[in-house]
Image (spheres, rainbow, N blue to C red):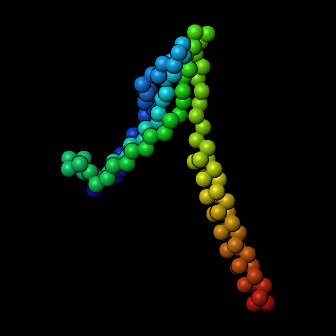
Amino acid sequence: MQMPVQKIRVVAGTPIVVGERRLLPSVLVTTMAGGDAGTGGLFRFVKARPVSLVVEEPEGARWLEIPNTTENILSQMAIAGAGIALLSVLLMGLFHLARKR
């Protein structure tokens, strides 16, 4: 059995013209496929996330990053949950040792 293959690439979207402005979005596409490629594979996972927007105006171009706030907050919550669980296990162990004395 083959290991899953992961590909990450940035794809430019279709330009959007609004008045004198031209907006060019870009998307981060993560593709993961597993299994035998000859038979279509066992699974395929595709994740698309907007990462930036280029605004072209008569005065010049500006690049605006789109932050991934949700993923950042969820990661912080997972780390806090793991820390609380570890602290709870340590406290239970200490209370158990103190009770035996």
Residue farthest bottom in this picture: 100
15 left or right, relative to 100: left
Q: Which of 54 and 6 is in front in this view?
A: 54
**Image quarter for residue 79?**
bottom right
- Residue 14 visible in this rendered orientation of the protein: yes
52 left or right, relative to 77: left
Q: Nearer the viewer, residue 69 or 97?
A: 69
- Where's residue 32, x and y in %? 37, 46
Residue name at image x 53 percent, y 15 percent: 19
Residue name at image x 58 percent, y 34 percent: 66
Residue name at image x 54 percent, y 30 percent: 52
Residue name at image x 67 percent, y 74 percent: 89
Image quadrant occupied by the N terminus: bottom left
Query: Does 76 sit above or below residue 7?
Result: below
Residue farthest top in this picture: 58
- Residue 6 visible in this rendered orientation of the protein: no
| Number of residue marks | 0
Query: Does 56 sit above or below residue 66?
Result: above
- Where's residue 13, x and y in %? 43, 27
- Where's residue 43, x and y in %? 31, 53
Image quadrant occupied by the C terminus: bottom right
